[in-house]
Amino acid sequence: MTASVWRSVLYVPGDKPRAIEKARGLAADAVILDLEDAVAPEAKVQARENVRLALRAGGWRVPVLVRVNGLGTEHEHADREMALLSGTAGLVLPKIEDARTVAALSLGLPLWAMIETPAGVLNAAAIAAVPGVAGLLVGANDLARALRTQPHPDRWPLLHALSAVVLAARAAGKVPLDAVFNDITDPDGFARECAQGRMLGFTGKTVIHPGQIAATNAAYGVTEAQAAEARALINAWETARAEGKSVVAHRGSLIEQMHVDEAQDNLTLWVQQTQPESTS
Ligand SMILES: CC(C)(COP(=O)(O)OP(=O)(O)OC[C@H]1O[C@@H](n2cnc3c(N)ncnc32)[C@H](O)[C@@H]1OP(=O)(O)O)[C@@H](O)C(=O)NCCC(=O)NCCSC(=O)C[C@H](O)C(=O)O
Ligand SMILES: [Mg+2]
């Protein structure tokens, strides 16, 4: 599946070999092997070795990214070198605050910038526009702490930042991925947040537990009925255009080129969902 249609992206702590193995069989569209905040300082070196072995072993059905430790940390260079030499599909860079630091990396593989500080949000458009950047990920835990916001079931205090990330990514033609939902025992709250993220314009969501994957794929995916409706809309458009009509109504509503484009996007996602091996 191409990154532009990733629905679920699973974080897996680099110091948990059992979870890394389990991730191979899960239905996430991409995996992030994490060396940063999921790993305690004393476990960092072993985690890097675990990730190296997992990448070198191969056999992954989906793209595997590595979240390296932050710029300026003692692990920065070793993490990056390991990931580059071991065949990762991309690097996730935490706490990115400006475009210049990302542009200076020029590593020749897709970079995923995490927006999780106030400065990162304010500079998100410039960060997204850096040529090597494939997408932006929201880090809502760090951001909430930095902004001193309080939790809210509909994330009101973070809405401006969430939309800023979507705007920045979309303006640059890059992929916006929503933040993690921390409570793995709250499926209703999780589903609500997935629906909100999709409404805001995110392509997909980062998740932290196998139990969150199916709901994410459903929320960000396309159902068979939606695919059929997309075909019907395209068909109505093409028929009307062939008859020389410039204004087209379908099921009582005006449709224009952007609706046809959206229907085409849904069909593309449907094909990638149902035949992932033909498109990855
Ligand atoms: C949240 C967890 C600590 C819960 O762990 P646990 O209590 O072990 O869960 P379960 O017992 O329900 O696990 C059941 C089985 O599933 C496997 N498992 C659990 N999580 C994962 C996973 N992420 N990937 C793959 N497999 C997973 C367990 O191994 C069990 O398997 P088995 O033994 O075979 O039954 C835990 O889920 C966890 O550690 N999650 C990831 C946490 C993480 O990565 N955090 C960092 C990224 S989030 C972040 O930093 C966001 C951002 O930066 C911000 O600022 O917001
Ligand atoms: Mg973070």
Image (spheres, rainbow, N blue to C red):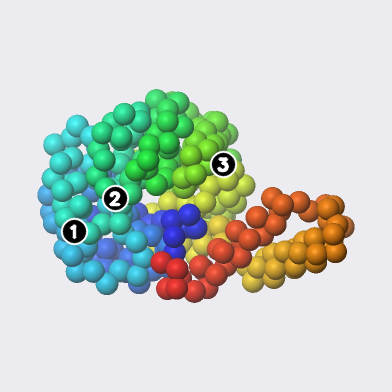
Q: Amino acid at mark 1?
A: Ser
The residue identified by callout 1 is 86
Q: Amino acid at mark 2?
A: Leu
Crowding near pointer 2: few (<14 within 10 Å), some, many (20+)?
some
Where in the figure is residue 150, as x and y percent of width and height? 49, 31
Q: CA distance from mark 2 to mark 3?
A: 36 Å
Describe residue 70's horizontal placement relative to residue 221 as left or right: left
Crowding near pointer 1: few (<14 within 10 Å), some, many (20+)?
some
Numbered disc in front, either 1 or 2: 2
Crowding near pointer 3: few (<14 within 10 Å), some, many (20+)?
few
Q: Is residue 243 visible?
A: yes
Q: Write down the quadrant of residue 266 in the picture.
A: bottom right
Q: Write down the quadrant of residue 157 in the picture.
A: top right
Query: Can you say whether 176 is above or below 9 in the image?
Result: above
Q: Which mark is residue 153?
A: 3
Q: Amino acid at mark 3?
A: Pro
Q: Which mark is residue 67?
A: none
Asked whether 167 or 141 is in front, the reply is 167
The residue identified by callout 2 is 109
Numbered disc in front, either 1 or 3: 1
Q: Earlier in the sequence, mark 1 or mark 2?
A: 1
Where in the figure is residue 83, as x and y percent of width and height? 20, 53
Q: CA distance from mark 1 to mark 2?
A: 12 Å
